[in-house]
Image: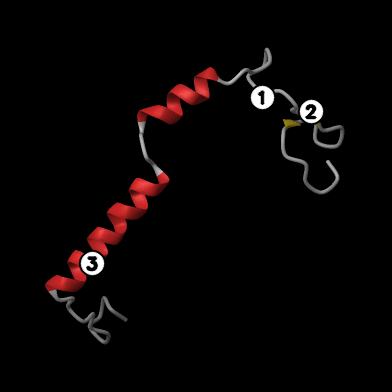
Amino acid sequence: MKTIGLIHDPEMDESTRKLIAEKRAAYEAATNPKKSAPAAEASAEPTNANGFPPGATLCAKYNTQALVLMDGC
């Protein structure tokens, strides 16, 4: 209905836009403190010959190796 003009979005004032930008920056900083660090940590983790983490087991039902146990698999 927005595309045909029946619903109009109210314009946000500058203070609201600034608040949203600050909250977005804080959230992104909290979730991704350093973008280069996860790549370095991922390569430092030990893996088996197939690239799975230790503790990953082969599911007999689906013949897939996984670390998370779900549905009794």
Residue for point 28% across, 78% down? 2
Q: Give the Cα separation between the discs numbered 1 and 3.
A: 41 Å
Above or below, 5 relative to 20: below
Q: Nearer the viewer, mark 3 or mark 2?
A: 3
Is residue 58 or residue 32 the one in the foreground? 32
Is residue 45 or residue 69 the one in the foreground? 45
Q: Where is residue 63 in the image (x, y as percent from the top left)?
A: 80, 30
- Which of the 4 quarters of the picture holds residue 53? top right
Q: Position of residue 71 (x, y in %)?
A: 82, 49
Q: Position of residue 3 (x, y in %)?
A: 26, 76
Q: Residue 8 carries which label?
A: none
Is label 3 in a helix, a strand or a loop? helix
Q: Give the Cα separation between the discs numbered 3 and 2.
A: 47 Å
Q: Residue 53 carries which label?
A: 1
Is label 1 in a helix, a strand or a loop? loop
* Neighbourhood count class around disc 2 (C-alpha, 10 Å): few under 14, some 14–19, many 20 upward: some
Above or below, 26 relative to 37: below
Q: Which mark is residue 19?
A: 3
The amino acid type of the residue labelled 2 equals: Thr
Q: Nearer the viewer, mark 1 or mark 3?
A: 3
- Which of the 4 quarters of the picture holds residue 6? bottom left
Q: Give the Cα separation between the discs numbered 2 and 1.
A: 10 Å
Q: Is residue 43 left or right of residue 8?
A: right
Q: Which mark is residue 57?
A: 2
